[in-house]
Image: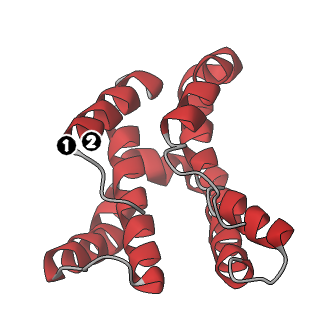
Amino acid sequence: MPVMSEEWQIANQANKNRWFLGNQDAIDFVNRFFDAVELWDDLIDKDVEITDDHINRVFTSLMFALPANPWFVAKYTYYQPLIMASINGFHDSNEMCNSDEKRFRSLAFHIRNFGIEIHIATAFLLGGYDHMRKVSREIREFYAFEEFNNA
C-alpha cells in the first residue's frame, strides 16, 4: 500500500467519524484492524520498511486492544466471516497477482480489497441499511487510490 499523505490521513479519520456516526469504539476497531492489515501486506510485499514500532503497535492491538474493544466484542460473530473472507481473498490475491493471464492479475487486484466490506458492514451495523447505502459508494471511492496497470 502506498504511504498516504498527512492530509489523506486526516480526511480518512474525519470520514470514519462520519461514516461510523461518531462511534469511537467502532472507529478504534477499524483503525486497529486495518493497521494490522497494512502491516501484513507490507510483510508479504516487502515494498516498504517496517519499523519495530509498527510491529509492536499491531501485536499489542491484536493481543490486547481488539479483544478489549466493546464494539468488536459485541459484533464479533458478525465480523468473523468477513474477516476470514478478507484473509482468504488476500491469500488468493497474492497467489494470482503474478499469473500469466491478465484476467487473473486483474481479479487479484480487486479481491485484495475485499476488506473494505468491513467498513461498509460497520456503517450498516451502526446506521442500518439506508445509512450503509448512503455511504458505501463514498467509502469505496475514497479507498480507490490505485489503478490496475498490470497489463
Query: With respect to residue 146, does 119 lie above or below?
Result: above
List x then y, in percent, for residue 78.
65, 50
Q: Which residue is mark 2?
A: 9
Q: How is the image coloured?
A: secondary structure
Which residue lies at the image location 66% right of the left edge and 55% below the top edge? 114
List x then y, in percent, for residue 37.
45, 66
Query: With respect to residue 1, does 130 lie above or below?
Result: above
Q: Could you say which quadrant of the image residue 94 lies in?
A: bottom right
**Which is nearer the eye, 51 or 105?**
105
**Which is nearer the eye, 73 or 135?**
135
User: Is 7 displayed left or right of 79 in the figure?
Assistant: left
| Dot 2 and dot 1 residues touching (CB under 8 Å) | yes
**Quick one: label 1, few (<14), some, or many (20+) residues within 10 Å?**
few
Residue 81 appears in the picture as rendered: no
Q: Could you say which quadrant of the image residue 123 lies in?
A: top right
Q: Which mark is residue 6?
A: 1
Query: With respect to residue 51, does 73 lie above or below?
Result: above
Q: Mark 2 and mark 1: span between their CA atoms?
A: 5 Å
List x then y, in percent, for residue 91.
66, 79
Q: Amino acid at mark 1?
A: Glu
Which residue lies at the image location 61% right of the left edge and 56% below the top edge? 113
User: Is 47 displayed left or right of 123 in the figure?
Assistant: left
Secondary structure type for disc 1: helix
Q: Amino acid at mark 2?
A: Gln
User: Is 91 displayed left or right of 62 in the figure?
Assistant: right
Extreme-left residue of the structure:
53
List x then y, in percent, for residue 109.
67, 63
Q: Quadrant of the N terminus?
A: bottom left
